């Protein structure tokens, strides 16, 4: 699963997976529209549904936190 | 009749002096304060600028940013917001084009402003607001103003690699806003929730609707747009009644099924523009807010906000097309076909050309580009009659409503932003290791794809672009090709690239 998530993240933007612990918001790698696109891509690719309340700064801080969030859903 | 937008401010301040005008996440001002502060800023500037000077304002959106804007206008100049999210090179290129005697910033952005290649003086808005009032000088400037004077300059993507500054005059904004608030019944009891950045002309409707009607304007912080939950909380807490938003921002809420969390029930009007609104998202919004009015607005920056509108009817369905509708009063729309003949037949496609009071004054400091698209109406040989050629194609539906079809050229809309592929390509070509490049838009994945031929990896290209382009213009995907497909004229064959790599068809 982890590999699959990383693959989706990579297609969305290579920079997300270059350093799994880099702060995606502070570094400006993810902006408002990127986050929505990323959520939609993850939902489609993994066949899951990510609740709007889970789309939070904590869960989208870095690649590791995104992976943790999805593993929690599944 | 008003000749200057500040007359809207002064009338409203006289009528509702103690009413809240603008609020951001840090402070708020009444109409009386907004007028007073703007006059102070204008007094501080009046000796430093000349009539018609274009003054850059390097600040985030906020109450003080508006005071800087109106201060500039009081002093006889026009303003241009220089967005801090832009990379330095793009800021420098805009500053070079504006060639201004001063730049206004705030304490927060001073340090970065000082690194720009800029010959003029850098002024702090905090200090301008402590200037001595110079009423006589401001009155003299007002006496000589005309409604043909420039009001603001918005920069938009240019195909040759440098952004173009669209100069819009007072008269166009005065006329447009009067009709806009009248058509959609925006009034003093409304609270407008601003989404658009101030260098994006969607915000012109927020700002001047507030100024004309006495409605309150709440500036929703940029950070909220990353998280739909926060955004919905803001809309509810501030009792927003009017949303004049970019399509992409509305979709941000529906893409995440935000209404399952909360419906902002105070919202009565939702007006959107920037790109084609996907029907699925529109229907989700209508379902959540069945009583609200929804309006599709159309028009590029060059014709002053919008030239046409369509009020969405109750009974619209997913299979229906969403028209861009009919023209606003005081604006003329002509559809011109092959050989510039006028199209009146239903169903026949032509280019949308806009005349009347809409067209801007042109591109700042660029006569050549101005003359290429702000042209004499080819159907009028008798007197001067300027049309702006939008490059957008449309046709009249059976009921007379205009339906948007697409573009004539390689300009695209990505996340609501107008982007010339040529601007991205010319920036990529500045990398000495790249021999050829072609950028295409992958509609399905909403991604800009850069195809390049050369001895470098995607990281090298991307890092170079970060210094030159705003984030939304940087391609999301890079494809290295052995040899670019060329057409008979030796130019890159865009169609072949598209069918091979994006549509995945064998050629």
Image (spheres, coloured by chain):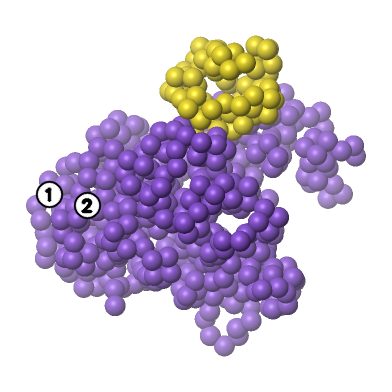
Chain colours: A yellow, B purple
Q: Residues within 10 Å of mark 1 (few under 14, many from 20)?
A: some
The reply, left or right, for residue B193 in relation to residue B249 is left
Q: Chain of mark 2?
A: B
Image coords of residue B353 (percent x, y): 60, 69
Q: Is residue B248 above or below residue B323?
A: above
Question: For the view shown, which residue lies furthest in the bottom direction?
Answer: B382
Task: Name the residue that disc number 1 marks.
Answer: B131
The structure residue drawn at horizontal position 57% and vertical position 46%, both measured from the top left corner, is B284
Question: For the view shown, which residue lies furthest in the left direction?
Answer: B132
Q: Quadrant of the C terminus of chain B?
A: top right
The structure residue drawn at horizontal position 16% and vertical position 42%, both measured from the top left corner, is B127
Q: Nearer the viewer, residue B238 or B346?
A: B238
Task: Name the residue that disc number 2 marks.
Answer: B20
Q: Is residue B170 above or below residue B160?
A: below
Q: Residues within 10 Å of mark 2 (few under 14, many from 20)?
A: many
The reply, left or right, for residue B496 in relation to residue A35 is right
């Amino acid at each position: 699963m982890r590999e699959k998530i990383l693959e989706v993240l990579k297609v969305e933007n290579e920079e997300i997976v270059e350093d799994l612990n880099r702060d995606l918001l502070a570094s400006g790698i993810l902006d408002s529209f990127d986050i929505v696109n990323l959520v939609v891509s993850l939902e489609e690719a993994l066949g899951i549904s990510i609740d709007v309340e889970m789309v939070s700064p904590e869960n989208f801080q870095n690649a590791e936190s995104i992976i943790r969030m999805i593993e929690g859903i599944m | 009749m008003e000749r200057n937008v500040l007359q809207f401010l002064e009338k409203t301040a006289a009528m509702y002096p103690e009413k809240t005008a603008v609020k951001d996440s840090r402070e708020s001002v009444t109409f009386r304060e907004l007028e007073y502060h703007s006059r102070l800023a204008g007094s501080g500037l009046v000796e430093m600028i000349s009539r018609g000077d274009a003054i850059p304002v390097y600040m985030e959106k906020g109450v003080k940013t508006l005071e800087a804007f109106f201060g500039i206008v009081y002093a006889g100049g026009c303003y241009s917001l220089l967005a801090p999210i832009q990379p330095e090179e793009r800021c420098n290129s805009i500053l070079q084009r504006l060639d201004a005697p001063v730049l206004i910033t705030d304490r927060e952005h001073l340090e970065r402003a000082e690194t720009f290649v800029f010959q003029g003086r850098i002024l702090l808005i905090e200090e301008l607001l402590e200037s001595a009032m110079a009423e006589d000088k401001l009155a003299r400037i007002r006496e000589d103003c005309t409604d043909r004077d420039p009001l603001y300059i918005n920069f938009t993507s240019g195909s040759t690699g440098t952004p173009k500054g669209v100069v819009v005059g007072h008269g166009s904004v005065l006329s447009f806003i009067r009709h806009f608030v009248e058509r959609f019944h925006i009034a003093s009891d409304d609270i407008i929730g601003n989404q658009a950045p101030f260098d994006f002309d969607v915000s012109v409707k927020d700002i001047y609707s507030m100024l004309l009607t006495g409605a309150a304007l709440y500036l929703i912080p940029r950070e909220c747009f990353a998280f739909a939950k926060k955004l919905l909380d803001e809309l509810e807490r501030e009792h927003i009644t009017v949303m004049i938003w970019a399509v992409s921002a509305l979709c941000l809420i529906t893409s995440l099924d935000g209404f399952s969390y909360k419906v902002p029930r105070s919202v009565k009007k939702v007006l959107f523009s920037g790109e084609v609104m996907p029907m699925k998202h529109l229907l989700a919004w209508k379902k959540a807010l069945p009583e609200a009015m929804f309006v599709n607005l159309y028009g590029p920056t060059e014709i002053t906000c919008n030239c046409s509108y369509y009020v969405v009817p109750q009974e619209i369905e997913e299979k229906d097309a969403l028209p861009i509708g009919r023209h606003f009063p005081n604006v003329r729309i002509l559809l011109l076909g092959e050989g510039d003949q006028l199209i009146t037949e239903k169903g026949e496609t032509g280019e949308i050309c806009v005349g009347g009071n809409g067209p801007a004054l042109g591109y700042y400091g660029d006569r050549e580009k101005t003359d290429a698209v702000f042209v004499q109406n080819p159907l009028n040989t008798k007197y001067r009659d300027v049309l702006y050629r939008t490059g957008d194609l449309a046709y009249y539906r059976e009921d007379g409503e205009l339906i948007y079809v697409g573009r004539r050229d390689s300009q695209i809309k990505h996340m609501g932003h107008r982007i010339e592929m040529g601007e991205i390509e010319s920036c990529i070509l500045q990398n000495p290791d790249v021999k050829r490049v072609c950028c295409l838009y992958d509609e399905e994945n909403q991604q800009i794809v850069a195809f390049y031929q050369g001895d470098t990896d995607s990281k090298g290209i991307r890092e170079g672009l970060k210094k030159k382009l705003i984030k939304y213009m940087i391609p999301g995907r890079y494809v290295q090709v052995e040899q670019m497909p060329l057409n008979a004229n030796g130019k890159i064959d865009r169609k072949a690239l598209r069918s091979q790599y994006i549509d995945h068809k064998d050629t």
